[in-house]
Image (cartoon, helix red, strand yellow):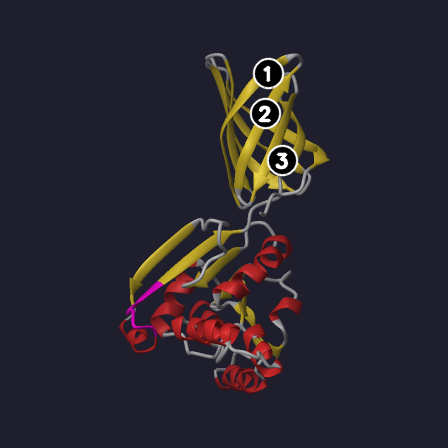
């Protein structure tokens, strides 16, 4: 369950080493750990890092007492939903929403986080044990729309590198973890652009662009026009925003644009003083994104 910190990790390890492991222990492991409240300072910094605003819908997986979603609604006028497996905490959170007069914008449901529908989220928050984070990684990456901000407290998604992270002092955590600090991680869910693209530049000949993607990184790329090979450089993807360069000899074209499903479009700064023109692209073959 959310708000799980180092003491929960110790419990997790102890349960794994226990013999025999009984069914009740397995059920506890599935929840992501025991409930521990998140300090308000951490909540505030998570919402700030996630750039939460009044147009956002915040989903908190393992919502505990609901503090993240409640604060998002009260301080930022956002909407949202908390998901937790503990019915008592869900009742408490819904009662708090009623008390604060925000039950029309936020709600809390008792549900296994793996069964949660994440499609409405523009911001997703988590505070779950490392094993649970890794088990949720594929769901988070594939179900959330490109551009959604994901913010996690203390634990990360392994080799899916965060786009940003911050650390800061939280004295009240020392009583539980022995360390008076918190680390927050932020990911911006990337568009899935792996595959072959036909790129058209206004007034010029088309290019073929091939991209191999691993999470938000482009790990392999190639390009050609006619029988000539070009060299893609500095391919960068941040949510739906893409930028790259295509070089042919000393001539370098600088592309910036936006991904929209099976299409891309934007502006390209052409070499030799030719100025800025529009470009567009259509995907002609899809490749899976590497997540191993």
Q: Which is nearer the N-term, disc 2 or disc 1?
A: 2
Q: Are marks 3 and 2 in contact (CB under 8 Å)?
A: no
Q: Which is nearer the N-term, disc 1 or disc 3?
A: 1
Mark 1–mark 3 Cα distance, whole angstroms, equals: 21 Å
Determine which residue is flagged by label 2: 222
Question: What secondary structure is marked by label 1?
Answer: strand
Mark nearest the camera among 1 and 3 is 1
Q: Is residue 75 left or right of residue 138?
A: left
Q: Is residue 225 left or right of residue 215?
A: right
Residues rendered magenta in the picture:
177-182
Mark nearest the camera among 3 and 2 is 2
Q: Are marks 2 and 1 in contact (CB under 8 Å)?
A: yes
Looking at the image, residue 68 lies above or below residue 140: below
Determine which residue is flagged by label 1: 229
Question: What secondary structure is marked by label 3?
Answer: strand
- Nearer-the-camera pick, 1 or 53: 1
Residue 13: x and y in percent read: 47, 71
Mark 2–mark 1 Cα distance, whole angstroms, equals: 8 Å
Picture disc at residue 264: 3
């Amino acid at each position: 369950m959310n708000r799980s910190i180092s003491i929960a990790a110790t419990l997790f390890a102890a349960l794994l080493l226990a013999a025999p492991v009984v069914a009740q222990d397995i059920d506890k492991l599935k929840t992501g750990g025991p409930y521990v409240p998140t300090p308000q300072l951490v909540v505030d910094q998570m919402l700030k890092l996630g750039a939460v605003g009044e147009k956002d819908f915040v989903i908190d997986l393992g919502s505990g007492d609901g503090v993240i979603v409640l604060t998002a609604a009260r301080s930022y006028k956002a909407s949202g939903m908390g998901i937790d497996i503990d019915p008592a905490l869900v009742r408490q959170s819904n009662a708090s929403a009623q008390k604060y007069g925000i039950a029309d914008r936020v709600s809390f449901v008792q549900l296994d986080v793996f069964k949660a529908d994440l499609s409405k989220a523009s911001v997703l928050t988590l505070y779950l044990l490392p094993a649970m984070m890794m088990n949720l990684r594929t769901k988070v990456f594939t179900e959330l729309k490109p551009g959604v901000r994901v913010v996690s407290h203390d634990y990360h998604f392994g080799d899916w590198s965060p786009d940003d992270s911050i650390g800061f002092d939280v004295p009240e955590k020392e009583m539980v973890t022995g360390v008076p600090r918190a680390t927050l991680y932020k990911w911006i869910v990337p568009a899935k652009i792996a595959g072959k693209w036909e790129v058209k530049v206004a007034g010029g000949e088309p290019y073929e662009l091939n991209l191999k993607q691993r999470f938000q990184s482009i790990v392999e790329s190639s390009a050609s026009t006619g029988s000539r090979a070009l060299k893609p450089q500095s391919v960068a993807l941040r949510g739906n925003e893409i930028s790259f360069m295509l070089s042919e000899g000393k001539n370098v074209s600088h592309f910036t644009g936006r991904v929209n499903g099976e299409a891309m479009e934007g502006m390209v700064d052409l070499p030799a003083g030719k100025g800025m023109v529009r470009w567009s692209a259509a995907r002609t073959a899809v490749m899976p994104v590497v997540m191993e």
